[in-house]
Amino acid sequence: MDEVQGISELSRLAVRGTTHRVREVHSGIAGRVFDVVGPVGRPVRLWHDAVAGLGYAGVGVALGLGARAVGRVAAGRASGRGLDEERRGRVALGVLNGAHGDLVHAAAPGLDVGMTVRVGGRVVPPEAEALRTAFPEATGRIAVFLHGLTETEDSWAYGAEKHFGRAGVTYGSLLQADLGLTPVYVRYNTGRHISDNGRALAALLAALVEAWPQQVQDLVVLGHSLGGLVARSALHQARDGDAGAQPWTALVRDTVTLGSPHLGAPLERGVHRLAAQLARLPETRPLARVLALRSAGIKDLGRGTVVEDDWTGTDPDAPAPSSRTLVPLQDGARPLRRPRDPQPEHVGPAGRPVRRPDGVPPQRPGRHRGRRAAGLPRRPRPAARWAAPRRPPGPPAGVRGDPALAHRPAGGAASPGARDAGGGLTGEPVPAASPSGSAAVVLHSTAVVLHDRGSSVAGKQQNLLQRLIAWRVSAAMEPQPPNETLLKLQQPLWDLLDRWYFRLEIDGWENVPDRTSLVVGVHSGGALTMDAWTLVNAWHTHFEGRRTLHGTAHDVLMAAPGLGDYFRAVGVIAANRRSVGAALEQGDDVVVWPGGEVDAMRSWRKRDVATLGGRTGFVKQAIRSGVPIVPVATVGGHDTVFVLSEGTWLADALDRFTGLKTTLRGANLPIIAGFPFPLAVEILPAHVPLPAKIRTALLEPIEVDDDPERADDLAYVQKIYDQVEAAIQAGMDRLAAKRSLPVLG
């Protein structure tokens, strides 16, 4: 119930904020025009401002009341199961907390994941009895895992089934088998300030050590990305190395940070600068305010801020960066480096490079001033930099530090000889210079291969963006049932949109076969194809959840942070043969839109043209899977946004310099006119759909030969393709004849 109320409150705030931003854009553009007109237009301006103000206020109130009403309906229909009881729900909560965690903490505490120990997704309080039950095989050696931004503890097991053949393999389970460490996974609200999370982590570790079933001998803290900064903040606030330090800090033998931006994240700094530039003009100032909505945790990443004094009383969105307290790594920190570098830099106190044994001074000391002050070693020269091999066979020979955590795909097993008598993760004695007997290992973002996902497409080397897209899409390869809790929560909203906003008309349910089917149609509306979403929702409503219909989406959308996670949570799969074939094999229905981006982003003048793009793969898939094809005709979706140009010329021009068409697997960069931007180039969604009337019809099924060899019969495949395309076009012509005006229907 708390989660439902939290979602309702966040929806109300989002609707209100959207109304404000649209009003500000409107006011900025109108104000520019009235300024040009001068005093002559002042009476008109006063009247315009009054009418617009009343209009936007009325819309804001109405939408706010609607959001609350939807929340009440959802609360009444809630099953009582928490979102975090299913993996997809945990992913959604992780993304929400990471993107807007400070707002969630203040306005919707029921959705705040807090700072908690988790086992199987459930909270384990740091109490003796609860810990004894949750960790029946607890040892005196603990490894605490801190995930990164927008993640959950499930991220430590990502890809385990693919690489190890079973889903239960994690970094923690491997360390437990190799080194006797008991893994403890912590989930926290990654959107809160790093210092707030650091303080909460320090308190949690103190309570954990106090209530642990066994006498704690040593403690290892491992943090990925943001988690590494939270670990540093916790140790700093616990006064590590001081006389008054909290007792648990003396037990920390190793700290490992994986890809943590200790000096700040360049991407966040870029967003910060962009927001500052957008804030300079009244027309774009609302966009700057939208960017400013990113969470405090994300903003802290910009400069690696881990101390509360650095943000208290300051404006995090100010153009000039605020000062930052330089916090050294944990006492006794040492870098992980390749000993094969003929003359590695020696690191002195506070990470300062000192003269090497051969008397050669450090090179270009000025370049590394920030790293030395932050307590970090010099950034290695390119020849000595930690570079992850494409397909690593295992840990490289002679790596100093922990071979178990160096170059190992998917948290591969450590060498049995890595454990030493003194504890910790290293295979060599803890440095005597460390007062607390601890060591810290810093691994840069290129130092650890988390998963080997392949490195080529069509025999060519992938660029960084292609690898990122492939990594995100790989999570949607295997069809999973939709998150029922999420579906129930969003159902009232979708019903409201279908009935009142898009005024959906859909018929032809009698044409749907009683057996598994491949649904084929066209979809429209740029990056937000509302005719596709309304079809999937209508299917779920009509069959009352008895038949699952998996939607399919382009790789770019599946890879988009937030949007791709939501797609997976509601059962959308990647639009490829492997995913679709697996879904049909397990008896689920699948809907595909063969035209892809060519179809969705076609010119508005072609809005009533069935565009399948000449892609016959759906016919071959139906033959191989032995399922009938159900054509779907729909009109109205392309009135939710106006595609002025398909932008093939723009895509071609950019492709010459960037290879963008290959990377994004698309031939279009459409230029659209919509709301709130009157003109925009759309790759990811850049518009709010207009309330256009959508009409959809499920047509008579088309049976195909179930002999798999017919999939290689090009003439037969083309015959079925032409039959499907003709049926869809005829259906669209009938539906378009009912339309009197665009948008209005």
Image (cartoon, rainbow, N blue to C red):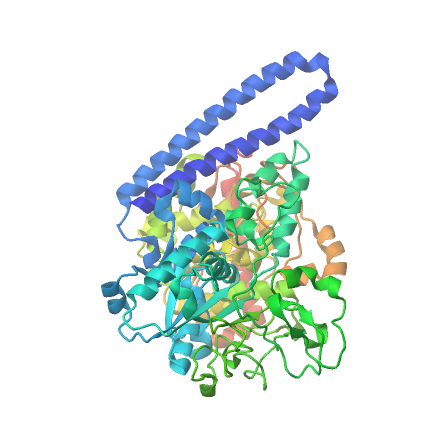
Displayed quadrant of residue 455: bottom right
356 left or right, relative to 531: right
Q: Residue at x 57, y 74 (%)?
A: 454
Residue 691 in view in this figure: no
Q: How many labels were placed on the picture?
A: 0
Q: Position of residue 366 (x, y in %)?
A: 74, 62
Residue 641 in view in this figure: yes
Nearest the viewer among 120 and 218 is: 218
Q: Is residue 5 above or below residue 45?
A: below
Q: Position of residue 743 (x, y in %)?
A: 53, 34
Quadrant position of the N terminus in the picture: top left
123 left or right, relative to 654: left
719 left or right, relative to 662: left
Q: Residue at x 47, y 49 (%)?
A: 192
538 left or right, relative to 330: left
Q: Residue at x 31, y 45 (%)?
A: 2
Nearest the viewer among 517 and 179 is: 179
Q: Is residue 584 above or below residue 680?
A: below
Q: Position of residue 266 (x, y in %)?
A: 64, 56
Q: Is residue 576 above or below residue 166?
A: above
Q: Residue at x 62, y 42 (%)?
A: 604
Q: Position of residue 205 (x, y in %)?
A: 38, 62
